[in-house]
Image: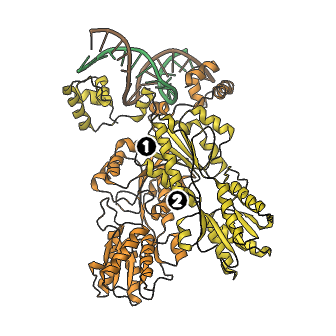
Chain colours: A yellow, B orange, C brown, D green
Amino acid sequence: MITIKDVAKEAGVSIATVSRVLNNSPKVSEETKKKVIDAINKLGYSPSFVARSLATKTLKTNVISIFVPFFTRDFFVEVLRGINNVISKSDYSIHLYNVEKLEDKEKIFTKEVFNRCDGMILVSFELKKKEADFLKEIGKPVVLVDSFHPDFPSVYVDNKKGAYIAVKYLITTGRKNIAFVSGAIHDPLGFMASYKRYEGLLQALREANLDFNPRLHIQTGFSWEKGYRAGKTLLNRGIPFDAVFCTSDIQAMGVMSAIVESGLKVPDDVAIIGFDDISDARYLGLSTVRQPMTEMGEVGAKILLDLLLGIESSFTHIELPLELVIRLTS
Amino acid sequence: MITIKDVAKEAGVSIATVSRVLNNSPKVSEETKKKVIDAINKLGYSPSFVARSLATKTLKTNVISIFVPFFTRDFFVEVLRGINNVISKSDYSIHLYNVEKLEDKEKIFTKEVFNRCDGMILVSFELKKKEADFLKEIGKPVVLVDSFHPDFPSVYVDNKKGAYIAVKYLITTGRKNIAFVSGAIHDPLGFMASYKRYEGLLQALREANLDFNPRLHIQTGFSWEKGYRAGKTLLNRGIPFDAVFCTSDIQAMGVMSAIVESGLKVPDDVAIIGFDDISDARYLGLSTVRQPMTEMGEVGAKILLDLLLGIESSFTHIELPLELVIRLTS
DNA sequence: CTGAAAGCGCTTACAG
DNA sequence: CTGAAAGCGCTTACAG
């Protein structure tokens, strides 16, 4: 490895001088500056990031860490797309942490991890008190995407309301027995989306004086297969239902396949509404609650970048709108 | 910031001893070990990654850098999914670099960037001689995914063959005037997929003594809209065609919309075959050439992990199979 | 088993 | 404008 000493020797100056040209110090004569630069180029020298950090104690990493339940749901891919849209235009690079299990979370809430970045974005994290305190102690900018906490800037949607308008629409169009296919209502990792949407559903039913039959509620994973099996289960239970509201499009698609297979017609016999509005939904004509996934990522990343620049006024809480998109399945 | 000195003082030992327990050195008495650990916990001490690296010169970063044209095509999302599947089970974390423009590429081929990781995966990169030399000089493990270079382990598919079997199928089923919607044949970033698939198409046509009308060839981007516009353009040119082969599913879907809108029937009037087999293709019934996108990422990541462990025998070149999937559009 | 000291590669007052 | 030297937080022979 070639170091600053080698360059100094080659250029016939002290290491202090080499360091100065490295840092664009103005107090170096053009002449010696040129000698140093020539030496650097000749030797192919590149300063040690590590030594530099130690010496300056600045520890600027130019890294933004993103904590996200990576790729398990289309939602996160879209959010990541938005984050990347913004960050790729900056000088920062992206450190991606996958958090799908509780142990991942423990692995991640350590100083070691946080020391290696300048700021971070947490996607869909409900911060517990302890975790919030920890982050505050670290003192680096943190932005929450798709979750809310009073002490951190965040960008999110109103999941309860989203479910409410979808279910209300179903009721308005004459549906009475509404099934619900969701993620875990009490998610071990603390994801709140399913819980909030559940609340929205209950509210809409309550307002219409309709009962919710818990036997028409399936909690399952966010995949086509899980949705498909949920649809089968619902059918097998023999309890009549004329609509299914799902917490994601991908689940809705699975449910729809099961229903169509059984000989029932969508939407005549059973209406279906999903959540997200992924591209598949458009192709399939699936009715859904559209959330601005990419935009959420973009807005979150912009806030973080501003915070990193020291723009304190960028500390905000932003709610993005949800939109009911009616297509062919309802 | 609390340092090793503070811990030493708190525990009443020297910093050397603290360092020893930090590194699990066996030559520390249980007694003093306990004192040190208590002090560490009490103070909430976490060793400086930077100082450690400098002292050991080991520079183990536990980071794997992935260079990928991020998210512009479904293909890359699937490859990333595969890479993440494997890496998330290891101790490494993922540093993601987006490379969509030539300047991104220049920004990336610097020692600064490479010094910050233990190994890297390049997705869809055709390495130029200069770049290959540079990587060899760095000396860290590099794996190529979706491209080939004799000097680096790689995992890839035979794009030429994939196009060949698709076009041959079209010819076999009676199609004579085959249009081609591709990415740039001479891509500025050096992506070769479109070029290879173009070669495959030409070969199949040649073997059948069929001419290729360059006016039936559209070079465009990998998106639904670009495909849609390509379809419109093809239609407007007034040159009859009875099939379209596309270099991606997403383009094929756009093309299909344009064609159906014009009143033509798929596949009766025009057959369509895409490439990739993304999930949308299944829903739409799109015929396509399936490539094992996720698997490519998984295999590449596994090779890299082995290399990182020093298993030299894992240096290999692996070709993964392509498969023609005929559904409703051909 | 433990400590004093040198050293990792750089930066930055302090002199000159 | 330039150099000698201290220091960043840690590791690791070297003594004892």
Q: Is any atom of residue B24 visible in this view?
A: no
Same chain shared by disc 1 and disc 2: no
Residue nearest the observer in this picture, A183 or B235:
B235
Residue nearest the observer in this picture, B223 or A295:
A295
Image location (x, y in percent) of residue A256: 65, 74
According to the picture, the residue beneath numbered tag 1 turns out to be: A92
Mark 1–mark 2 distance (CA, rounded to whole Å): 22 Å
Residue lying at 25% horizontally and 24% vertically, measured from the top left: A28
Image location (x, y in percent) of residue B215: 27, 78
Under circle 1, the secondary element is loop
Point out the residue furthest to the left here.
A31
According to the picture, the residue beneath numbered tag 2 turns out to be: B81
Chain letter of the residue carrying label 1: A
Query: Is A316 drawn above or below residue A80 in the view shown?
Result: above
Residue flagged by tag 2: what amino acid is it? Arg
Residue flagged by tag 1: what amino acid is it? Tyr
- Report the quarter where the N terminus of chain A lies: top left
- Report the quarter where the C terminus of chain A lies: bottom right
Circle 2 crowding by C-alpha within 10 Å: few under 14, some 14–19, many from 20: many
| The image quarter in which residue A33 lies | top left
